[in-house]
Amino acid sequence: MERTKEPEPADVPEGPPLRAIADAVRRERTRRELSLGELARRAGLSKSTLSQLESGSGNPSVETLWALAVALGVPFARLLETPSQPVRVVRSGHFAPLTSDRAPFTSALLAACPPGARRDLHFVTAEPGAAREAHAHIPGTVEHMLVSAGRWLAGPDGEQVELAPGDYACFPGDRPHTYTALAAGSAAMLVMEYT
């Protein structure tokens, strides 16, 4: 009987895929016929920050990429897309997280929305401290959160719910919402569904 070779674990990435992000932001900005200055204005960023990002020399936070996705009217994952493979395994701890510049929160895109599908899968972690405040995403966005560790307070502003391991919550992502870790080592799977 022939044994199937297990995929070799990849080296742990040091950060987000900067070249892919730079290319995606430039592609989407050009597709919408926006100048660098106009996109920066719409996203609430400085023109120099956007210029650095498009050149591949910036180090974007989660907030920066969400602001750009909303300003461009595209799913968040479209700014992180990398070439896909037929079988893709992401080993625990072997993904490139994006960090928040406002809260002890990270997000790693595990699966982007392929053409024709309308969902993205993220693995998020956080430590107790400031809330990760998320602006409204593109209209029709729904978030699905399944807690795997720790405790969270999450949901739309004024309607947050406390979640423990194994708890699932579904809420509108096209309204301002927050994620707050209530225990050390909090982790969850987050599915962004776009309509």
Image: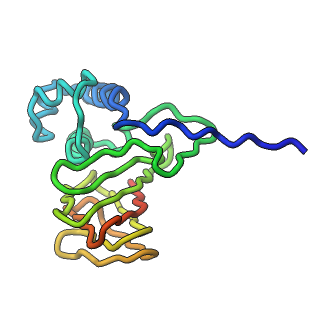
- Tell me the residue at 62%/38% (across/down): 8
Instruction: Tell me which corner region of the image, top left, top right, bottom left or bottom right, holds residue 160.
Output: bottom left
Q: Which residue is situated farthest in the top direction here?
A: 55
Is residue 50 toward the left or the right of residue 10 in the image?
left
Q: Nearer the viewer, residue 7 or 51?
A: 7
Percent x, y of residue 96:
39, 42
- Tell me the residue at 36%/62% (across/down): 143
Q: Nearer the viewer, residue 11 or 100?
A: 11
Viewport quadrant of the C terminus: bottom left
Percent x, y of residue 171:
32, 69
Viewport quadrant of the N terminus: top right
How is the structure coloured here? rainbow
Is residue 12 toward the left or the right of residue 171 in the image?
right
- Tell me the residue at 30%/67% (across/down): 184
Is residue 174 toward the left or the right of residue 185 in the image?
left
Q: Nearer the viewer, residue 19 or 106?
A: 106
> Is 147 above or below relative to 162?
above
Percent x, y of residue 126:
29, 60
- Tell me the residue at 14%/30% (across/down): 49
Instruction: Tell me which corner region of the image, top left, top right, bottom left or bottom right, holds residue 82.
Output: top left
> Is 129 above or below relative to 63?
below
Is residue 188 toward the left or the right of residue 90 in the image?
left
Percent x, y of residue 88:
58, 42
